[in-house]
């Protein structure tokens, strides 16, 4: 069983209750890992600059010329790379030159979990 600190998806910060960090486990921890993967920009993590989503730069998702299908494929790969994710039940991606909205429903250990993210 794995755990992490519970993320608040509204503020993108750790959840605090009673002055203490809230621990998440099970599917909550896996959903947190999906959010972290989707919010990590390519080259951002100093321990492995090959990790992350190419949001900006030449050939990036935002401001680039990638179609919705190509963007969906990149994001699907990132989501499915989280070991607890069994499958993506549905996914819709809306993008323009400055914003990206991801609505997805994923299966984690047989449970359906929604993913909503705007970048």
Image (cartoon, rainbow, N blue to C red):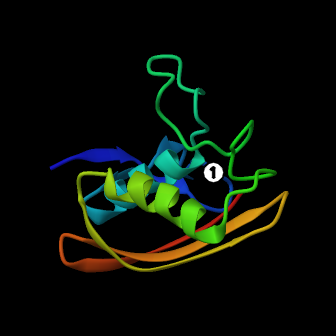
Question: Which residue sits at x=15%, y=50%?
Answer: 1
Comparing 82 with 114, the one in front is 82
Q: x, y (%) of residue 23? A: 37, 49
Question: Which residue sits at x=56%, y=44%?
Answer: 53
Q: Give the vertical position of 8 relative to 19 (above or below).
A: below
- Res 82 seen here: yes
Q: x, y (%) of residue 45? A: 53, 25
Circle 1 packing at 10 Å, graded few (<14), some (14-19), many (20+), is few
Most distant residue in the right direction: 98
Residue 61 left/right relative to 4:
right
Q: Quadrant of residue 85?
A: bottom left
Question: Which residue sits at x=35%, y=44%?
Answer: 4
Q: x, y (%) of residue 42? A: 58, 34
Element type where label 1 sits in the image: loop
Comparing 95 with 29, the one in front is 95
Q: x, y (%) of residue 109? A: 18, 70
Comparing 36 with 18, the one in front is 36
Which quadrant does the C terminus fall into?
A: bottom right
Q: Which residue is mark 1?
A: 12
């Amino acid at each position: 069983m794995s755990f992490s600190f519970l993320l608040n998806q509204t503020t993108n910060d750790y959840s605090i209750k009673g002055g203490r960090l809230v621990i998440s486990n099970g599917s909550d921890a896996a959903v947190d890992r999906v959010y972290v993967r989707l919010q990590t920009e390519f080259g951002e993590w100093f321990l492995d600059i090959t990790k992350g989503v190419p949001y900006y730069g030449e050939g990036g998702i935002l401001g680039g010329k990638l179609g919705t299908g190509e963007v969906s494929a990149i994001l699907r790969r990132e989501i499915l790379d989280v070991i607890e994710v069994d499958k993506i039940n549905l996914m819709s991606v809306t993008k323009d030159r400055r914003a990206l909205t991801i609505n997805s429903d994923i299966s984690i250990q047989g449970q359906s979990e929604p993913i909503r993210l705007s970048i």
